[in-house]
Image (cartoon, rainbow, N blue to C red):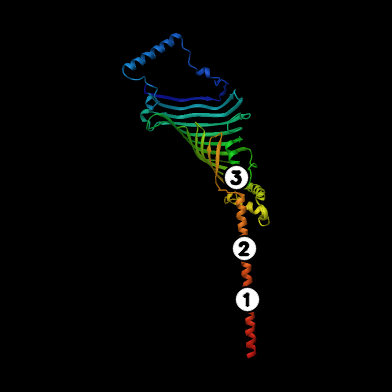
Amino acid sequence: LLKKQFVLNELMLYTPQINIVRYKSGAFNFSDLLAPKKMTPEEKAELEKKMKEEAEAAKEKGKEPEKSKPLTADDIPVAINIGSVGMENGNINFTEMASGQKINIYKVTAKVFDIRIDPATLEKNDNVSLNVSAGIKTVGRTQSGSVQSFDIGFDINGNIIPFDKKTRKLNPEIIVKAGSPYGTMTGLQIFNEMMNIEQLTKYCGKFDFLKKDLEWKNGYVSIHFKDNVATLKDGKFANDDYALTFGGKINVASMALDLNTDMTIAAKHTVKVKSQTTKLAEKAITGKMKDYVKADQIADAAVKPLLNDKGEIYLKYEIKGTAEKPAPKLVHPALGSLADIVKDAGKDIAGAVADKAADAAKAKAEDKLKKEADKKTDKAAKKLKKLF
């Protein structure tokens, strides 16, 4: 400290067992540790006297009492150099008494390290490195929110820039690579809305053949966070049924969504979708059209825009709304209706019939001309024969 430096090599908790309870009142089981010490009547009177004196002194100078200012790098009197702070291999149990919900966070390693903050050289020394890895799961079914249950492993590595270099104010900027080596979610609201979007289900039926549990391995996403907005980039995870890529923004204060998602469904499900579409096409074909148009032909035409060059169903979405009430919109492919496809097929058939009739008429006319020409040729040959 004599050198105006704060140096700490390590402050770590190893294998801690932590139990957190939030009571119905909203207080936690550790709230009493954070509550300020109650002042004696003498201490309270002394504090009020001091505050009154400061207010009167400021008034005499014609100034209002100073309001609390945002923390800046210049408020730190020393350079900070810390090796690592956090926990390793911890276990945290959280219980919400109001709802009875329990959550377990296991194998927790959460630490900040290589902390270098120096107000004198802020351009070069304004960094906190971050490493978080853990698993988090529900104990029982969730009582509220946008999922029913989950068990997710995650691994986050990156950096935090605590102070804005231009304003020098505390305004953390977070840049991390977040991975999820495994995960399972049941009843994820966004996924349910994507699969049950009306435009899609009317066209080729519900995608209820996909598992209710959303499972993945080796998922990841790059995250940039500042001013309550998390920007997601290069997000990806996959399982045996489908692959998802995603990106966009989430406002963590309002949980408002502005996401773009691509979904590729495994080719093994194309047959199922085509079968569902065939059944819907049978209902869409009515009247005399049944004599000319077959349901499987309509299904082939309907499913074709959904497929990529590998025969997989490929869908693109825009997702607005909030995490609890997402509003996905299918932006690719542009789907009409089966009735429109039936009409187009009828026009094609009518055109083909007309072309066939025209070809038959043309062939008949040509045959008639040929016969007339043959008669004239035979007649001329007979005249020549008589002459010679």
Q: Earlier in the sequence, mark 2 or mark 3?
A: 3
Check disc 2 and report its element: helix, strand or loop: helix
Which of discs 1 and 2 lies nearer the camera? The answer is 2
**Residue that label 1 marks:** 370
Other residues around mark 3 within 10 Å, as few (<14) / some (14–19) / many (≥20): some
Q: Nearer the viewer, residue 235 or 250?
A: 250
The amino acid pointed to by label 3 is Leu
Q: Nearer the viewer, residue 167 or 10?
A: 167
Which of discs 1 and 3 lies nearer the camera? The answer is 1
Residue farthest toward the right in the current orientation of the protein: 291
Find residue 200 and name its label. Answer: 3
**Residue that label 2 marks:** 354
The amino acid pointed to by label 2 is Ala
- Spatial CA span between label 1 and label 3: 57 Å
- Spatial CA span between label 1 and label 2: 24 Å
Among the 4 quarters of the image, the one containing residue 377: bottom right
- Spatial CA span between label 2 and label 3: 35 Å
Image quadrant in which the N terminus is located: top left
Image quadrant in which the C terminus is located: bottom right
Q: Indicate whether 134 appears above or below 296.
A: above
